[in-house]
Amino acid sequence: MEEIPDEDNPDSSKSSSSSPLVKRARKLLYRNLRVGVTDGRVFVGKFHCLDKQGNIILYDAVEYRQIAKPSSSSASASDCMEHRSLGLILISARVRTSCHVECSLDEQMSLLSLGDA
């Protein structure tokens, strides 16, 4: 994948591509992520990008939320998951509580190591 240097700052591509955090983020591109937010919802989608503020953009995203569904046999409510397709979404870093990559254990270990990047 060839990088296009910024015309205003010719060293921008060199400095960003050598950063270990950028290398780690590039390993996550197009992988399925599961992101939890403060209100209890969970978003599952493919990782598209991450900005400097820590906001995440997912595409082909699906929102899952827990809803209380009254049970006819008892007075207490049982929980069930409701989902809806969203497409492209931005998840703010302020509301994000968790972020998990959906992959095998071997892939998770390779994502954690930067030696072969």
Image (cartoon, rainbow, N blue to C red):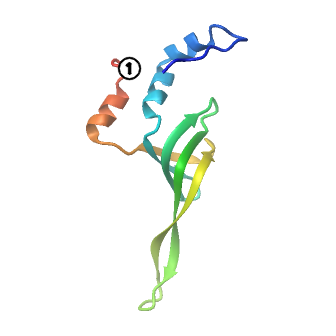
**Residue 26 x/y as whole percent:** 47, 28
Q: Quadrant of residue 52?
A: top right
Q: Nearer the viewer, residue 94 or 19?
A: 19
Q: Give percent across and percent down for residue 46.
A: 48, 44
Front residue of 79 and 7: 7
Label 1 secondary element: loop
- Residue identifier under label 1: 117
Q: Quadrant of the C terminus?
A: top left
- Amino acid type, label 1: Ala
Please state the horizontal and vertical placement of residue 6, each as a whole percent of the image.
67, 15
Seen at 37% across and 21% down, the residue is 114
Could you tell me which residue is drawn at 34 percent across and 17 percent down?
115
Q: Tell whether 22 sits left or right of 5.
A: left
- Camera-side residue: 1 or 32? 1
Residue 88, above or below 68: above
**Residue 73's spot in the image, x, y percent?**
41, 91
Residue at (43% x, 40% y) in the render: 31
Can you name the residue that lies furthest to the left here? Answer: 106
